[in-house]
C-alpha cells in the first residue's frame, strides 16, 4: 500500500450504493456522453461515486472509456485528465454476481500533486451520504482485494481515504489562518474609524463562517467565505487609498443574510475572488435614499 505522501499517485477503493442509466458511451469515439446523446451509443451505469468525482474535477477533459461497457453496463474503465491530475476509474462487481448495485465497487487511481488529490478526496467524501470506504459486503470486498490488489486491505484503504481528507482539511485551515493573520493588522489600523465598523464585523463573521464550513467539510463554502474576507481586507487596507470620512452608503447581503457595509464597489485582488463574488449575484441596495420603502 502506497504512503499518502507519495508525490505521484494513490489508489482508492469506494463502495457503490446507487447507480442508474444516467449516461451513455459514444460508440464512435468511446467518450462519455449524457443520456440525451442522440448518436450511436450504449448505456452506462456510472454510480454516485463516479458522478461525484467527475462533478468535482476542475475543467476535465471529456472522459473516455479504455474498457467500454458491454453486456454488463456497470463494468467499465474510464479515464480523464483535469489540469495536473490524471484519473482512472474502474467499476467492478465483487459480490452477488453483479446483480445488485451494492455488489459493485469503484477503484480510483489518482496521479498528480498530493494537494490536488487530497482536495478531490475531500470533495467526494463530503458529497456522499456515507463514507466511501465502508463496504456493503466487507468479507467479499476483502477477498476481491486479495485477488486483484494483494498489497491493499480494507483497513489500509480506509486509512488512505481519511489521511487524504485530513491533508485537504489542513490545507484549507492553513489558508484561513493566513487570511486571519493578514486581517489582524489591517483591522487594527482602522478599528477607530466609525465607517469601518460594519466591515470589521463582516470580516469576523466570515471568519466564523469559513471555520464552520471547514468543520462540515464544505470546501466551496470555505472558499466563498475566504473570497468575502479578501474583498473586505482590500477595502479596508490603507494602501488602497480609501478614506472612511462618511458612514457607508451601501450594503450587500451574503448568502447567509449577514449585512456587509461598504461605500463603493469591491475589486478582489485575484480572479478567483472576483469569480466567486460574481457567482453569488450580490444585490446592492442604496440606503441613502430610503431603499426598501415604496416610492
Image: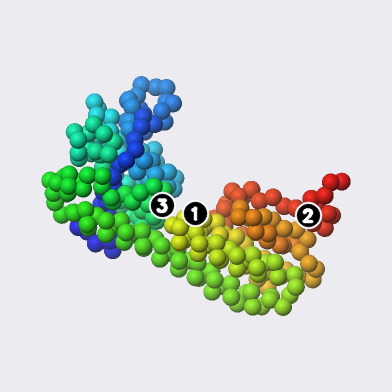
* Label at residue 137: none
Residue depicted at x 17% and y 44%: 140
Of callouts 1 and 3, which one flags the residue occurring earlier in the amino acid sequence? Answer: 3
Residue designated by label 3: 126
* Total marks placed: 3
Q: Upstream in the sequence, badge 2 or badge 3?
A: 3
Q: Nearer the viewer, residue 208 or 36?
A: 208
- What residue appears at the point 33 percent right and 27 percent down from the top-left corner? 43
In the image, 51 versus 89, the foreground residue is: 51
Instruction: Find disc 1 in the rendering and name its residue.
Output: 220
Residue 7, quarter of the rendered image: bottom left
Q: Residue 295 at what x, y percent from top left?
A: 87, 46
**What residue lies at 37% left-to-right and 52% top-to-bottom?**
125
Residue 155: horizontal and vertical position, in percent? 22, 57
The residues tagged by marks 2 and 1 sit, at their Cα atoms, a distance apart of 29 Å
Is residue 188 placed above or below 80 in the rendered structure? below
Please say whether residue 222 is visible from this viewpoint: yes
Residue on which the image places disc 2 = 286
Q: Regarding mark 2 in the picture, which secondary structure is present there?
A: strand
The quadrant of the rendering that contains the N terminus is: bottom left
Amino acid at each position: 500500500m502506497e504512503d499518502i505522501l507519495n508525490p505521484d499517485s494513490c489508489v482508492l477503493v469506494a463502495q457503490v450504493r446507487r447507480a442508474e442509466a444516467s449516461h451513455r458511451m459514444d460508440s464512435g469515439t468511446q467518450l462519455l456522453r449524457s443520456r440525451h446523446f442522440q448518436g450511436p451509443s450504449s448505456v452506462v451505469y456510472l454510480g454516485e461515486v463516479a458522478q461525484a468525482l467527475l462533478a468535482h474535477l476542475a475543467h476535465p477533459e471529456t472522459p473516455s472509456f479504455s474498457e467500454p461497457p458491454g453486456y454488463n453496463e456497470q463494468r467499465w474503465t474510464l479515464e480523464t485528465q483535469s489540469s495536473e491530475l490524471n484519473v482512472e476509474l474502474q467499476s467492478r462487481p465483487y459480490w452477488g454476481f453483479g446483480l445488485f448495485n451494492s455488489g459493485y465497487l469503484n477503484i480510483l487511481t489518482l496521479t498528480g500533486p498530493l494537494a490536488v488529490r487530497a482536495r478531490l478526496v475531500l470533495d467526494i467524501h463530503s458529497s456522499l451520504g456515507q463514507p466511501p470506504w465502508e463496504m456493503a459486503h466487507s468479507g467479499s470486498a476483502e477477498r476481491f482485494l486479495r485477488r486483484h490488489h494483494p498489497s491493499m486491505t480494507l483497513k489500509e484503504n480506509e486509512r488512505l481515504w481519511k489521511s487524504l481528507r485530513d491533508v485537504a482539511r489542513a490545507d484549507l485551515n492553513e489558508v484561513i489562518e493566513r487570511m486571519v493573520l493578514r486581517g489582524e493588522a489591517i483591522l487594527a489600523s482602522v478599528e477607530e474609524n466609525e465607517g469601518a465598523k460594519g466591515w470589521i464585523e463582516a470580516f469576523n463573521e466570515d471568519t466564523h463562517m469559513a471555520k464552520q464550513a471547514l468543520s462540515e467539510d464544505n470546501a466551496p463554502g470555505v472558499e466563498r467565505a475566504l473570497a468575502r474576507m479578501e474583498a473586505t481586507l482590500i477595502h479596508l487596507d490603507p494602501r488602497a487609498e480609501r478614506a472612511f470620512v462618511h458612514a457607508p452608503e451601501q450594503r450587500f447581503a451574503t448568502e447567509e443574510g449577514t449585512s456587509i457595509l461598504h461605500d463603493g464597489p469591491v475589486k478582489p485582488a485575484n480572479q478567483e475572488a472576483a469569480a466567486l463574488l460574481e457567482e453569488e449575484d450580490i444585490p446592492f441596495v442604496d440606503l441613502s435614499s430610503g431603499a426598501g420603502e415604496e416610492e
